[in-house]
Image: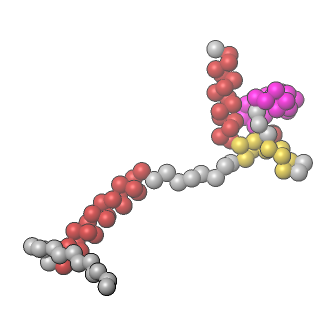
Amino acid sequence: MQESKITQVFGITPSELKDDIIKDVRAELNVIAQNFQPIKPAEYLTRQEVATILKVSLVTLTDWNKKGILKPYRLGNLIRYKQAELEEALISINNKKH
């Protein structure tokens, strides 16, 4: 024997119930929309771009790669750097100086 589930609501019309539900759902969606942070795809920079940003030579860049200060990514013969990691490396270098 199957039990049927029944919910009874008193003192409100079906359209009023529907309007209340829609109002609450919209309020929650507005809260979610205000706090929404889209995921940014990683932006990769070339060696020359990184050297220009940091105002160093390509030789210094290679030296920093070997020392582990910067983390290069290889794509075949191409070397790229993630911009977010570059900013973290700058903060790390700055903290070591002080």
Q: Which of 23 and 57 is in front in this view?
A: 23
Examine the image and state in which quarter residue 95 appears.
top right
Q: Please state the horizontal and vertical placement of residue 45, each as a whole percent of the image.
A: 74, 44
Q: Is the N terminus in the top left, top right, bottom left or bottom right quadrant?
A: bottom left
Q: Does the magenta stretch include residue 63?
A: yes
Tell me the residue at 79%/30% (across/down): 68
Farthest-out residue, bottom: 1
Tell me the residue at 27%/77% (across/down): 5
Q: Which of 10 and 98 is in front in this view?
A: 10
Farthest-out residue, left: 11
Q: Is the magenta stretch mostly helix, strand or loop?
A: helix
Give the colouring mode of the picture.
secondary structure
Up the image or down, 29 lies above or below 96; here it is: below
Q: In this view, does 46 lie to the left or right of 41?
A: right
Up the image or down, 72 lies above or below 91; here it is: below
Q: Is the C terminus in the top left, top right, bottom left or bottom right quadrant?
A: top right
Farthest-out residue, top: 98
Residue 46 appears in the figure: no
Residue 8 appears in the figure: yes
Q: Which of 31 and 62 is in front in this view?
A: 31
Q: Which of 23 and 1 is in front in this view?
A: 1
Up the image or down, 76 lies above or below 3; here it is: above
Q: Is residue 85 left or right of residue 39?
A: right
Up the image or down, 6 lies above or below 88; here it is: below
Q: Give the range drawn in magenta.
A: 49-69
Q: Please state the horizontal and vertical placement of residue 46, each as a whole percent of the image.
A: 79, 44
Tell me the residue at 30%/60% (across/down): 27
Q: Please state the horizontal and vertical placement of residue 29, each as a whole percent of the image.
A: 36, 61
Q: Please state the horizontal and vertical placement of residue 81, each as a whole percent of the image.
A: 75, 42
Q: Does the magenta stretch include residue 23?
A: no
Farthest-out residue, front: 1
Examine the image and state in which quarter residue 97 appears.
top right
